[in-house]
Amino acid sequence: MSLSHALLTCLIETPQSGYDLSKRFSESVSYFWNASQQQIYRELGKLETQGYVVSEVIPREGRLDKKIYSITEEGKEYLIAWMKKPSEPDTIREDILVKIFSGSLVETKVLIADIKRRQKIHVDKLSKYKEIEEKNFAKVGELTKEEKLKYLVLKAGIRCELEWLDWCQEALEIVNSIT
């Protein structure tokens, strides 16, 4: 998946400004795809050049003009063509795994501190995902097709955080046993 696919997916529901996309991205899509505001604006420019989005400048008195992006039919076709292709798992890119792999270079307390820090991050993310689940998906049987599909993405995030928490616990046990 590329950032362009994630942005086009966000634009399917409603036209948005780059700022709004960045905000929405950080509140939803960023749970499974990370991008800075600068990357989002740069990618929107490329998508517009390719004809996958169009923009409309909305003048605002006393403030900078606002540029609203909409997905084009060509953009929808591009997104659908990508969706029809088989997906491939991404390569794991986790700096903590590289640190553990070469962990014999530092004192075990350094590794333990980093694992505990990561454990807290995963606890916090899991808590946030559970809040979203309770707020938006309490009655799974009553969800629309679109809501059920979004719920599946959330469930993947929940399971991922649970797996990371299991790994952190196991890693702490093993690293603590090293003399």
Image: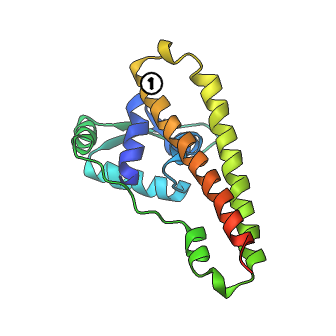
Image quarter (top left, top right, bottom left or bottom right) of the C terminus: bottom right
Residue visible at 34% across and 55% down in the picture = 46
Q: Is residue 58 visible?
A: no
* In the foreground, 97 or 135: 97
Q: Is residue 10 above or below residue 144?
A: below
Instruction: Specify the quadrant of the image occupied by residue 99.
Output: bottom right
**Number of on-image labels:** 1
Q: Is residue 10 above or below residue 45?
A: above
**Which amino acid type is marked by label 1?**
Lys
Q: How is the image coloured?
A: rainbow
Q: Measured from the top left, where is residue 75 in percent x and y?
A: 27, 41
Residue reaching furthest to the bottom: 105
Q: Measured from the top left, where is residue 31 in percent x and y?
A: 55, 46
Q: Is residue 4 visible?
A: yes
Instruction: Specify the quadrant of the image occupied by residue 54.
Output: top left
Residue visible at 38% across and 36% down in the picture = 70
Residue visible at 57% across and 40% down in the picture = 158
Q: Measured from the top left, where is residue 175 in percent x and y?
A: 69, 71
* In the foreground, 166 or 143: 166
Instruction: Specify the quadrant of the image occupied by residue 149.
Output: top left
Lateral position of residue 153 relative to residue 114, left or right: left
Q: Secondary structure at mark 1?
A: helix
Q: Which residue is mark 1?
A: 148
Mark 1 neighbour class, 10 Å CA radius: few under 14, some 14 to 19, many 20 or more: some
